Image: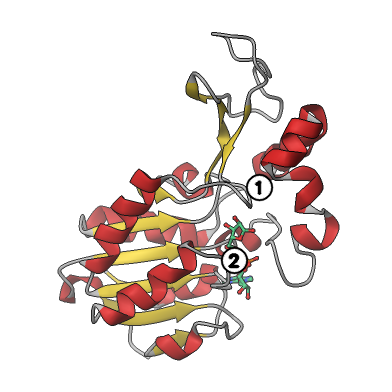
Amino acid sequence: MSPIALSDFRSVVFFIGAGMSAECGVPTYRGSGGIWAQYDYGEYACQRAFDRNPRKVLDFHELRRKTVLDCAPHAGHHALAKLQAAQPRLHVITQNIDGLLQRAGVHVAAELHGSLWRVRCARHGVHEDLAAARYATRACPDCGAPLRPDITWFEDMVDEDVFARAGELIAGCELFVSVGTSAVVYPAASFIPLAQRKGALMVEINPEATEASKLFMRTLREPASVALVNGFAP
Ligand code: APR
């Protein structure tokens, strides 16, 4: 199959899931070796768990930060950065919190589920943290309250401004490329049928079929590191 020429489209969205980071060594959430198979998110990644035991939750997230720092972006990340440099109307929207896209020089228009690299105080808002495994501090510098990861956990409300921005870009795109998502977590997963309803050319990059596969006209049953290098041209 010849590469898809991005210049044929006025606007392009790449919609990224955990599968994009899998080949870097960052575990996905579901499937074999998935994070939620090893850790109960009710114990480590929700506000209840944080209120109950902030130290345990922050220790878990420091472990995830270390895992990510031990990984590097793959050829697919770098290919996406190159495509974006050639095609300014290529927007990247990610569900991932690992920051690997940004480390490869990709401009990310929306981080739907926040970031491992930010922390927040309920009263004083978000603070950028270090690109280090350990948090610079676990207490808000303004009020001393425990800082929590700036990540959208299960049972959290999503960031409406971030989702509105993502929705706008997706509703207006002519090519929608889903990369490495199981498409089972809402409201993020609802962006896939939105793109389809708006008439975008739908492409899925995933070695396995997903619940949303029927919405895609083209599927690249390959790993992201291969499909992003071979499947697209500026
Ligand atoms: N290349 C492309 N896709 C891959 C690769 C790869 N090398 N390896 C695995 N995948 C696919 C899997 O087949 C699966 O469909 O990546 C997908 C990962 O699915 P999930 O682990 O469910 O990750 P994701 O869809 O991003 O999860 C969405 O769930 O837990 C929440 O907030 C968390 O953002 C996350 C959300």
Ligand 1 appears in which quadrant? bottom right
Quadrant of the rendering where the N terminus is positioned: bottom left
Separation of marks 1 and 2 at Cα, in angstroms: 14 Å
Identify which residue is drawn at 62% across, 51% down: 155
Q: Is residue 232 visible?
A: no
Residue 45 at x, y = what percent? 71, 45
Identify which residue is drawn at 22% across, 74% down: 174
Task: Judge left or right: residue 208 versus residue 171.
Answer: right
> Is 94 situated above or below 153?
below
Residue 200 at x, y = what percent? 26, 79
> Is 196 situated above or below 129?
below
- Amino acid type at image mark 2: Gly
> Is 48 situated above or below 87?
above
Could you tell which of marks 1 and 2 lies nearer the N-terminus? 2
Identify which residue is drawn at 53% across, 48% down: 100
Q: Nearer the viewer, mark 1 or mark 2?
A: 2
Q: Is mark 2 within 8 Å of ligand 1?
A: yes
- Amino acid type at image mark 1: Cys
Q: Mark 1 sits on what residue?
A: 71
In this rendered view, identify the residue nearer to me: 30 or 86: 30
Q: Mark 2 sits on what residue?
A: 19
The local secondary structure at tag 1 comes to loop
| Number of residues whose C-alpha sits closer than 10 Å to that of mark 1, classed few (under 14), some (14–19) or many (20 or more) | some
Residue 107 at x, y = what percent? 35, 46
| Quadrant hosting residue 64 | top right
Q: Which mark is residue 107?
A: none
Q: How many marks?
A: 2
| Quadrant hosting residue 86 | bottom left
